[in-house]
Image: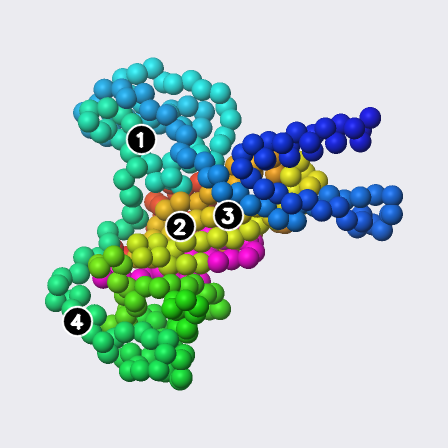
Amino acid sequence: MKKVMVFIILTMFLTSLVVADTTMTFGAVQSEDGDPNKITFRVIETINEDEEEFCGTSTYGVCETNDDCMRAGCSSQVCQSTSEEAATTTCEYRDCYDDEAYNAECRCAGNQCQWDFRVRTQIQARVLTQEQRQEIRQERNRLRAQDGECAEECTCTGSVTRCILEDGTREMTVTAGNSGNIIIQVKGINASTQVTLYKSEGKIYGDFDNETREVRVMPDMVKDKIRERLARELEDIEIELDEDGIYQYRATKRVKVFGFIRARARVRAQVNAETGELVRIRNPWWAFLAVEEGDLIIGAGCGTVSPDSRDECCMNKGYDLWDEQYGRDSYNEDYGCEFSSE
């Protein structure tokens, strides 16, 4: 009877995956304890292209300022007016309720309380003058992955360029990639990009949609940011710096669906290359059916060290300081390293 119930549950689960345009490949292997009469099912590959949209709701209650709006509901998924009776919802958490991950803000827009999706940044992005942009984009500052003039304060050997970053303790390597892109590597972590990069006065800049902006976040910092946010070790990491100045991060994590089917869940995230803002992080829709394997990473970030050492901890990671307010507002206390808003 027990085997029949397991078979029914698996059938229902696989059917739901087909309906949701999600493909999962299962394999049957011999049990790890060597018993030939036992079969272990493992998810060999998972492909999920159906990314869920933000599912918070708005009451469109009357307001005059942002102070007239508040979040309500068991998972804070409702944006409403303070003049309305607090919304009552069922107590269930879904990833699509995460307003921070979806860049949503409960605010007063058009005299109505509603979720707003304007980009929020941790710090003010630096605005360059026309003169500064022209100076930065001098050909002598361009980072190349082939033979040619070597950028100032860098060393070039063949098709490899090495530059010491502004903090003086980290080195960035630039090499040629595929299809005309370049690979930038810091502390062994790679990111591919087709963006033209420059190095000027110790800082890295990029041409993003005809706008020159500083690249303050390096690939190793992207990896650390996601790792600290999830407090888990991830695998199969791929990082790409796109033409909008956003790192597109993709990785997998080990999970057990229903607690016993081994699987790899895809994780996707976006990080602003200038401000360090975690723009979005997404898990597959079926993540609520799975439990993560492996132990939580304790002390991975700077929130768990002594308060008088947090600035130093953040600087060792390439940031400028620990933002106590930002770390406290986030649901992960380790997530508070910031750049100074110079």
Q: Amino acid type of disc 3?
A: Val
Q: Decide: few, some or many residues near mark 4? Use Cα within 10 Å; few <14, some 14-19, many ≥20.
A: few
Q: Earlier in the sequence, mark 4 or mark 1?
A: 1
CB atoms at circles 2 and 3 under 8 Å apart?
Answer: no
The residue at 38%/52% (across/down) is 271
In the image, residue 231 lies in the stretch drawn in magenta: yes
Q: Decide: few, some or many residues near mark 3? Use Cα within 10 Å; few <14, some 14-19, many ≥20.
A: some
Q: Is residue 341 left or right of residue 25?
A: left
Instruction: Between residue 154 and residue 160, name the one nearer to us.
Output: 160
The residue at 56%/56% (across/down) is 235
Which residue lies under the disc numbered 4? 135
Q: Amino acid type of disc 2?
A: Gln
Give the quadrant of residue 194. Answer: bottom left
Residue 31 position in % (x across, y down): 80, 48
Quarter of the figure with the N terminus: top right
Residue 67 position in % (x across, y down): 24, 28
Which residue lies under the disc numbered 3? 267
Which residue lies under the disc numbered 1? 115
Judging from the image, what secondary structure is the residue with disc 3 in? Answer: strand
Give the quadrant of residue 126. Answer: bottom left
Q: Residue furthest bottom?
A: 157
Q: Which residues are magenta?
A: 212-238
Which residue lies under the disc numbered 2? 270
The residue at 44%/68% (across/down) is 178
